[in-house]
Image (cartoon, helix red, strand yellow):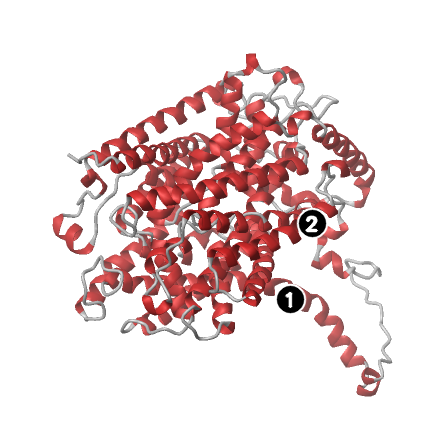
Amino acid sequence: MAPDRGSPPIRTRASNARDRQGEETEDNVPNQDISHSLEARRLAHQASQPQNFTLRGVLVGLAIGVVICFSNMYFGLQTGWVSGMAMPSALIGFAYFKVVARTLKFPFTPVENVLVQSVAGSVGTMPLGCGFVGVIPALNYLLREEENGPLDISLWRLIVWSVGICFFGVVFAVPLRREMIIREKLKFPSGTATALLIKVLHGDEKGKKSVPRGIREEEEEGEEQGLLQRASTDQDDDLLRPSLDVGESTLEEDLGEDGDWKAKMRLLLISFAGSALYTVVSYFIPHIHDIPIFGLSLAKNWLWSLNPSPAYVGQGIIMGPATTLHMLLGAIIGWGVLSPLAKYRGWAPGPVPDWTNGSKGWIVWISLAIMLADSLVSLGWLVFRPLVAIVRLYYPAARSTFQSHTWKDLLTLNITSTPTYTQLSDGMSTNPERTLKPHLLADPEPDAPPEHLISNRTTIIGLIASLVLCTVAVHISFPSLIPLRLTLLALLLALLLSVMGVRALGETDLNPVSGISKLTQLVFALVTPKSKNAVIINLVAGAISESAALQAGDLLQDLKCGHLLGAAPNAQFWGQMIGSAVGAVLSAVVYKLYTHVYTIPGGLFEVPTGYVWVFTARLVTGQGLPPMVVEWASGAAIIFAVGTGFRVWGNTRKRNGLSGWWIDFIPGGIAVAVGMYNTPSFTLARTIGGLLSLWWRRWKGRSETPIIVLASGLILGEGLFSIVNLLLASLNVPHL
């Protein structure tokens, strides 16, 4: 997946107001009760609409998902980048139904739009969820003979594997919904932004569209910064009434204008067409992928060239300036400093592009150390943060108890509590839970009626069945290679770590699936016996964890979007299950198509993520490292562990309303590592996109939405028309 963006986009700004939901005083309790009652009625009305689950919505979502799946497979095999494209899916689905509106028997509503984007996203992310951009290429092409590889996995076994691991993460997300969305009210910024886009697209048609409670509050707080103006102040506060912005902007300039979707769709189609044209031209002129902007010597000897791919510029736009500049820093360190150093010192004596003996393979170890350090610090903080809060909460009382009692009292449990009086409590004791988990004392979000939720019976049966299916699929796909007990351990770790990933996604919009998989690989290195299958077991276990975290996070993003718009959760769940099943089969077929036509790893598809996976497995299983890797990797890990610690501390300060402007100036470990293991040609194109995003949003002061739509068209155009190049290559059409 793409690294987290460095600067706060619309989806972050649009969700900031929700952080203040728990600040009402007790005087507002009656108003809260009325508000919750009205909101519950609205959710019940929305969830009961027949458009929550329709055949046409599922089919359109599947069609959009096929395009995203091809795009993600193409870019995933090139650089490891995968995106769910939730907002473009919502826009494309809306545009399609808008065009055929006169032929529809019943109208296309926001809840059906949610279904379309949920299905599309579940199909589109399967190349990553099933391991086809990393683990499977590593097993197919990168294992050594002494590691019992490479494995020749047939298409039907790939389908069994992908279908086996595509469900349990989705089912496991269901019980997390009530805790993280209803009780804790986590933001899930991308889901909130998609809900906002869908609400705005459907606009004020006949004055009958209802506003999500959370988004209406954001409008009233003025957090939209020009996207939407506050709703009408009439008695019916639930009616969506877009109006003029605070400034002099007109409805034509606002996203809420009904005709504005046409402009956005036109922009998407133009960028799509331009990117598609570039893709076809690049087949006949392949050298266009490597323009020697720094001279032929640097391009040939040190791989410093530019790939002017519109799609990678679009990826940079979506990633944002901070992340892309951090990736550029990684490219400079890796390819501008470490690569020549390793070459001239004899640590990597082979040709630079050689993954085994060249500096390309040598610097991957450094990037891997940075990724591991960043992941351990970030995930470690997710685990220890509640412990720190508990210690800070109960330490004063514990210290007072020890000071006021003798050892005999403590050993005999003869302890009497003394009420504490503070200026804030006026003699009332402070409820510990108020400090530790304030959301538990606040009223939970109103929820859909029980008949529109996923029942406990469905969840339990589905979870057991999906776990059994995964276990069987692993042993069919990799017969006699992985013991049953290790498969069960991998599933247990996957479920536990996916909770951490989903929480991080809800708070930061970043699902640390890479770190979760690396952590699983580290654990399995400790429990796996030394054997020829150790690396294979390590890779498969990591893939299972990555799949669970990705699927659970994707569903909860969609459920957050659906909750804000009143969509029925059970409809979204079954839509996600259908999309996952179709995406699993499709991604296996698409993977086989690409690997049959193209040489992997090769010039077009270097599968760098596959090398990262297999290098991680070799590292944690104790295999030998190239010269001087230990020293340089250890130093890099320490530096970026400290940097990540500062970033975590800064983000915590920002969530508490304190200053954290300096966070973007501390390089993110994952972004730097990605810049190191990808060749500079991709990173330079992404940096151009990040700078374009900076110019548009900061210097021009414009809304982020148009440039995100532009970027989506650039990505989808090249991704889809890579199929044309695939056909041309299979027919042996000559290059110019």
Question: Residue tagged by mark 1?
Answer: 387
- Return the residue found at the far top: 102
Disc sitting over residue 363 in the figure: none
Disc sitting over residue 461 in the figure: 2
Residue at image point 31% right, 32% down? 724
Residue 647 on image: x %, y %: 48, 58
> How many residues crowd mark 2 within 10 Å: few (<14), some (14–19), many (20+)?
few
| Earlier sequence position, callout 2 versus callout 1 | 1
Q: Nearer the viewer, residue 458 or 607?
A: 458
Horizontal side of 353 relative to 251 (left or right) equals left
Which quadrant would residue 26 be assigned to in this image?
A: top right
Residue 435 on image: x %, y %: 71, 58
> How many residues crowd mark 1 within 10 Å: few (<14), some (14–19), many (20+)?
few
Q: Nearer the viewer, residue 643 or 490?
A: 490
- Name the kind of residue labelled 2 in the image: Ile
Residue at image point 30% right, 50% down? 600
